[in-house]
Image (spheres, grey):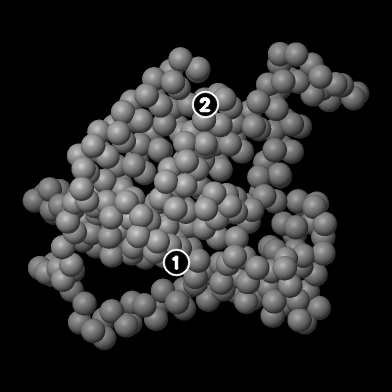
Amino acid sequence: MKGFEFFRNVSVGQYIDVGSYTHRLSPATKYMGLLAFFAVIFANRSPVGSILILLAALLAGAAARVKPSFLLRGVLPAWPFLAFISLLTLVFQKPSGIVLASLGPFSLSVAPLAAIAQMLLRFAAIVVSVGLFTSVTTEREAAYGVEDALSPLERIGFPAHEFALMIACALRFVPIVAGELEAIAKAQASRGGDFGRSGFNPIKKARAYLPLFAPLMVRTLERAEALAEAMEARCYVGKGRTRLARFEKAPHEALARLAILAFGAGGIAMGVLLG
């Protein structure tokens, strides 16, 4: 049953309460950090820069007392898809640069390998950054942080509270969907379904899990409908709501924000130099 433990390999959407300094930061500062990581990730176009960004995200996780193994295991569920994309890149991307090997009409050069490495490292950096954010941010903080950032747009009719609630529910639905996928796969395997025994062939893996998406979508929609009915039964109204919790700034939070801005500016500059 080890091959069916999808929930164990999901790092996005799981809060880890260890009481570190990063956990005590305000939601606005945590969103600043997440946006800084995203800006640096997409500004860098070289594998070397992506490696440095990934290491920086793991170091930030270690400072928040979140294990690097917990953050990296979020990449594991996507490996069949990543392997399939890497194979397509090797086959269809035009060879350029130094040719390492050739077999008939196909040639293996440095450029496709660099593109694959950049894709994998960028994906890993994104998963680690989002996993770090959700591991130090509660669902309430995630919703209130977006609402505070978008509250000025309410003057022109933008539903900041509803949008923040949607973001928070989407983040917390990730482990729920993983748990549902695990339950469906185990139920199908008990009825003779071939899951987890296809080896490391990404095509066989994709074909094996393809029939699971229809029942998974139905279960997810049922969960969403139950959540909507529960909120409606409690007369939930977004506009005009007051807050029970108030988030105080952590000590020296201004220095933390300056460090985030410095990291973002330095990372973007590094991307320009290495690109």
Asked if the residues shown at circle 2 and circle 1 are in contact, with their CB atoms under 8 angstroms apart, the answer is no
Coordinates of residue 230 in the picture (x, y in percent): 32, 83
Residue at image location 22% in from the left, 51% down from the top: 250
Image quadrant in which you'd find residue 42:
top left
Give whichever of 145, 190 is nearer the camera.
145
Please say whether residue 184 is visible from this viewpoint. Answer: yes
Q: Is residue 56 left or right of residue 141?
A: right
Q: CA distance from mark 2 to mark 1?
A: 31 Å
Q: Residue furthest right?
A: 104
User: What's the mark number on residue 49?
Assistant: 2
Three-letter amino acid code at disc 1?
Phe
Q: Which residue lies at the image location 18% right of the left edge and 74% below the top edge?
A: 237
**Position of the N terminus by quadrant:** bottom right
Q: Give neighbour class at mark 1: few <14, some 14-19, many 20+ (Cα, 10 Å).
A: some
In the displayed structure, does residue 213 sit left or right of residue 49? right
Q: Earlier in the sequence, mark 2 or mark 1?
A: 2
Crowd tier of the residue under label 2, counting other residues whose Cα lies within 10 Å: few below 14, some 14–19, many 20 or above: many
The residue depicted at 15 percent of the width and 48 percent of the height is 153
Count of picture labels: 2
Residue designated by label 1: 173
Q: Position of residue 102 (x, y in %)?
A: 87, 21
| Amino acid type assigned to the residue bearing label 2 in the image | Gly
- Answer above or below: position of 185 versus 43: below
Q: Is residue 130 visible?
A: no
Q: Secondary structure at mark 1?
A: helix
Q: Is residue 185 left or right of residue 52?
A: right
Residue depth check, mark 2 versus mark 1: number of the one nearer the observer:
2
- Is residue 138 found left or right of 128 in the rendered image? left
Instruction: Tell me residue 228's x, y (percent).
Output: 33, 77
Question: Where in the figure is residue 72, as x and y percent of width and height?
Answer: 57, 49
* Vertical order, 26 against 47 (above or below): below
Q: Residue at x 44, y 53 (%)?
A: 65
